[in-house]
Amino acid sequence: MKTFAAVDLGASSGRVMVGRVGPGTLALEAVNRFRNEPVRAGGTLYWDILALYRGVLEGLRRAGPVDGIGIDSWAVDYGLLDATGALLGNPVHYRDSRTEGAAERVASVIGEEKLYALTGLQKLPFNTIYQLVAAAGTPQLAAARQLLMIPDLLAYWLTGETGAEFTNASTTQLLDLGSGRWAGELMTALGIRPTLFPPLRAPGTVIGPVLPELGLGTPDVIAVGSHDTASAVVGVPAAGPDFAYISCGTWSLVGVELDAPVLTEASRRANFTNEGGVDGTVRYLRNVMGLWPLQECLREWGSPDLPALLREAAAVPAFRAVVDLDDPVFLPPGDMAGRLTRAGDRPPSGRAEIVRCVLDSLALAHRRAVRQAQELSSRSVGAVHIVGGGARNELLCQLTADACGLPVLAGPVEATALGNVLVQARAAGAISGDLPALRARLRETQQIVRYEPRGDAAAWRAAERRLEA
Ligand code: LFR
């Protein structure tokens, strides 16, 4: 039996899990969970990166001796190091408003069609490319010598080694999809220094041993799919290739796994992305707003009892209120219930109706993205896997099955940590096999709940039409 520590940082919470891997065994235990609370200071929204690092160190201490450590987090955000390797300021949160107008500036240098052909990435206002263009001319960027994505920054503090893990690098929109290398010419054209970016490393490579002075022993830190969504897709317990996945947490990442990117004009217009996956796969997906609107409402309402609220929401008639969750109006934090109430054709009233409105609307967005993923990639889909925290939300899973007209297989909730552990375990020689073999192990060891679609297709079509009106 070998043990691996999976550090998994999400937008609202972080966790360190210990995974035990042996013949017929794949078991996870949480050794530290901590909140991820962004801080607004001087008008900018920051990640509290040192609080996160403290949570990581505490988790690793509690984990005890392990055979490897893997780190994943949300994508696109970064820390800047000066010439001595010191962090220059706190990493800025991707939901900060500094990127307003940056996409237009980039488009005036390189057309959107060309940028899509080069990077294959969906246009999200907070992609690293736009953040760097927004930060152009700041003394901080001028002083920077290296840019490290969040998991790479934490790995640097643990090991002293710098690098850029490939799956997360693919979310910057600064990677050349064709060559799999940094897009140096694109960077130069935009005034971004190519020397900021360290060499790429593939998931499954050893980054280096933990520095002895940290008092954690010297296990290897192993590069995993360090973009949390890449690890989550590894953790999808699919039996064959004909599946769609929804990695459902703060975001819903909805898509299919492909061998080659889709770079058609229709794909660009539908804002589908070709992110880099583990083992050379393409994560062909779309960002759907996810549970963020619900999380924000709960925050505003002082964290009421969620199971009780979901029971009340289940009793609200379907489609009383639906909103288009793709609307960027829902991106920033604050006044979410108010924005939801103002957005639809029939405003929801009261908490249960607002929650139902979010879940009906999210199911509708899942339906649209699953359908588009199939159409645009020509991959047929027989079932939808929901992994991540959303897999626990029975109402959402059932509504998604109904909306898609497909069975939903829900779980594991901790798919990201499991994907993280599996890639480490394979790199350390504890297990072997390709992605289907890793997924077979998940099916043997993890609990998966099946939801059959209930046949009210016409009602979903009608609700969809209300959004298009
Ligand atoms: C999910 C995720 C998404 C990414 C968003 C912002 O946690 O990593 O894949 O688009 O966060 O980084």
Image (spheres, rainbow, N blue to C red):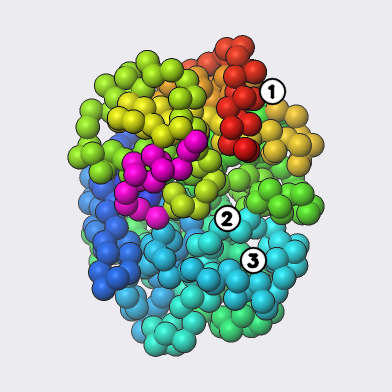
Q: Nearer the viewer, mark 2 or mark 1?
A: 1
Residue drawn at point x = 38 percent, y = 67 percent: 92
Q: Is residue 220 magenta?
A: no
Q: Is residue 452 above or below residue 188?
A: above
Residues tagged 3 and 1 counted as in contact (Cβ below 8 A): no
Secondary element at image label 3: strand
Q: Which residue is mark 2?
A: 167
Say whether residue 208 is left or right of residue 103: left
Q: Is residue 287 visible?
A: yes
Residues tagged 3 and 2 counted as in contact (Cβ below 8 A): no
Q: Which residue is mark 1?
A: 382
Of 330 and 380, which appears nearest the observer? 330
Range covered by the magenta-colored residues: 332-345
Amino acid residing under circle 2: Thr
Distance from label 3 to label 2 (Cα)? Answer: 10 Å
**Position in image of residue 71 (x %, y %):** 42, 52
Of 258 and 297, which appears nearest the observer? 297
Residue drawn at point x = 39 percent, y = 83 percent: 140
**Position in image of residue 268 (x %, y %):** 71, 54
Residue drawn at point x = 35 percent, y = 53 percent: 333
Label 2 neighbourhood size at 10 Å, few (<14), some (14-19), many (20+)? Answer: many
Q: Quadrant of the N terminus?
A: top left
Q: Is residue 419 above or below residue 114?
A: above
Q: Is mark 3 within 8 Å of ligand 1?
A: no
Secondary element at image label 2: helix
Q: Is residue 276 visible?
A: no
Say whether residue 328 is left or right of residue 214: right
Amino acid residing under circle 3: Leu
Distance from label 3 to label 1 (Cα)? Answer: 32 Å
Q: Which residue is mark 3?
A: 175
**Residue 90 lies in what quarter of the image?**
bottom left
Q: Is residue 334 magenta?
A: yes
